[in-house]
Image (tube, rainbow, N blue to C red):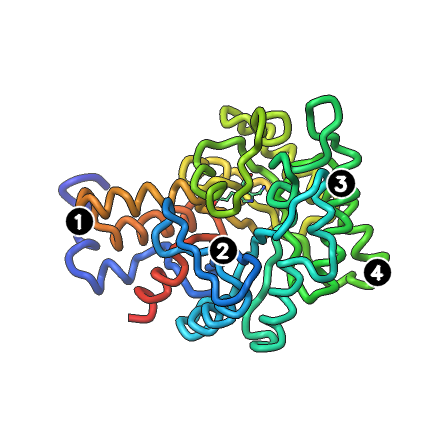
């Protein structure tokens, strides 16, 4: 049956009928908000390239978490800016590390009202800014997965609900699963940044987390943005190694990867709508070139439509405000 019998515009006539046939809807349950925690007291350093985002000391982070819970966002992803950095990122494995302190304090204040996802990587903690231990000018895979395992265990011990390795070393999910299980954290899930691309969209984050590499780039461990089959191999390996949730990152320019991942694997998929994707929207909106709220919702909806179950986004609070309206 074709035109004039079939007229798809019949189901677009008014908002109610459009909502009836809406195939994708966002929910508060989909959102994770990334946060940056730094040393000190009463510290609130604005991140200039990411309007509305701050490096927060633990005391202010607690206040922020209160607001987050009040607006209905149920999960945060924590990144740390340590006082000191070292060659191997060992500072990230200490019981009194900045993220460990933050996790304990959030748990003390809010119990299980917030699901705390802890990012696991060395780049914020090494003095060279790479994601692991350098040997002969490149990150050594097998040495690095040992520090990542130690960092993961320490974060789990401080109360992290989910461990999220973002380093892209081979074999790290298996090694992290092993150390968690050996230490009675069999119930702590791993959300693995499985298909993480070497992307220009991370620029603003590196200002936020003070984690830009001092030499070279991350192309010897993060993926080439031209590849899709390789992403499926990365995901398959992470699942074999024990990942509970897999992640695609960035999101907007990688909707095809999200779609493939969802259709090829029966596993929850997270997508990270990264800093550069956020900043572009903020900058264009500040210039009056786009309608910020509309674009924000359209981007998030498209990520979900592509197949993501979970969206990590700096817009989480603002999306929640729209959903609560
Ligand atoms: C750490 C890490 C990065 C991001 C999340 N975890 C930066 C990087 O790989 O350089 C980027 C997040 C964002 O841009 O919002 N490895």
Mark 1 → mark 2, Cα distance in angstroms: 40 Å
The residue that appears at 57% across and 51% down in the rendered structure is 81
In terms of secondary structure, where does tag 2 sit?
strand
Question: Against 215, is 116 above or below?
Answer: below
The residue that appears at 40% across and 40% down in the rendered structure is 276
Q: Label 3 belongs to which residue?
A: 145
Mark 3 → mark 2, Cα distance in angstroms: 23 Å
Q: Label 2 belongs to which residue?
A: 34
Quadrant of the image occupied by residue 6: top left
Name the mark nearer the viewer: 1 or 2. 2
Dot 1 or dot 2: first in sequence order is 1
Quadrant of the image occupied by residue 251: top left
Instruction: Give the total number of marks visible in the rendering.
Output: 4
Report crowding for label 2: few under 14, some 14 to 19, many 20 or more residues within 10 A (C-alpha).
many
52 and 228: which is toward the camera = 52
Dot 3 or dot 2: first in sequence order is 2
Q: Label 1 belongs to which residue?
A: 9
CB of mark 1 within 8 Å of CB of mark 2?
Answer: no
Q: Label 4 belongs to which residue?
A: 183
In terms of secondary structure, where does tag 3 sit?
helix
Mark 2 residue's CB less than 8 Å from ligand 1: yes
197 and 122: which is toward the camera = 122
Mark 4 → mark 3, Cα distance in angstroms: 17 Å
Q: Seen in the image, is 306 located left or right of residue 93?
A: left
Dot 1 or dot 3: first in sequence order is 1
Q: Seen in the image, is 17 located left or right of residue 86?
A: left
Q: Position of residue 39 (x, y in %)?
A: 57, 59
The extreme top residue here reads: 136
Q: Position of residue 314 (x, y in %)?
A: 42, 53
């Amino acid at each position: 049956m074709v035109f004039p019998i079939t007229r798809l515009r019949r189901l677009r006539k008014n908002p109610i009928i459009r909502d009836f046939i809406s195939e994708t809807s966002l929910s508060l349950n989909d959102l994770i908000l990334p946060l940056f925690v730094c040393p000190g007291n009463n510290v609130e350093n604005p991140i200039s390239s990411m309007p509305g985002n701050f490096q927060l000391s633990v005391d202010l982070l607690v206040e922020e978490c209160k607001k987050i819970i009040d607006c209905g966002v149920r999960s945060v992803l924590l990144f740390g800016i340590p006082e000191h950095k070292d060659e191997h990122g060992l500072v990230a494995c200490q019981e009194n590390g900045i993220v460990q302190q933050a996790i304990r304090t959030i748990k003390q204040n809010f119990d299980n009202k917030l699901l705390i996802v802890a990012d696991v990587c060395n780049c914020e903690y090494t003095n060279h800014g790479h994601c692991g231990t350098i040997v002969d000018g490149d990150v050594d895979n097998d040495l690095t997965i040992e520090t990542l395992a130690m960092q993961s265990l320490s974060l789990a011990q401080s109360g992290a609900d989910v461990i999220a390795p973002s380093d892209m070393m081979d074999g790290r999910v298996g090694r992290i699963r092993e150390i968690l299980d050996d230490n009675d954290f069999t119930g702590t899930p791993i959300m693995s940044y499985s298909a993480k691309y070497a992307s220009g969209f991370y620029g603003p984050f590196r200002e936020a987390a003070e984690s830009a590499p001092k030499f070279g780039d991350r192309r010897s461990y993060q993926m080439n943005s031209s590849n899709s089959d390789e992403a499926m191999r990365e995901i398959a390996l992470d699942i074999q190694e024990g990942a509970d949730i897999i992640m695609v990152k960035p999101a907007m320019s990688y909707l095809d990867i999200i779609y493939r991942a969802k259709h090829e694997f029966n596993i929850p998929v997270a997508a990270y709508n990264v800093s550069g994707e956020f900043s572009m929207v903020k900058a264009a909106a500040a210039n009056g070139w786009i309608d910020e709220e509309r674009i924000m919702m359209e981007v998030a909806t498209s990520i979900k439509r592509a197949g993501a179950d979970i969206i990590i986004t700096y817009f989480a609070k603002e999306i929640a405000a729209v959903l609560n309206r």
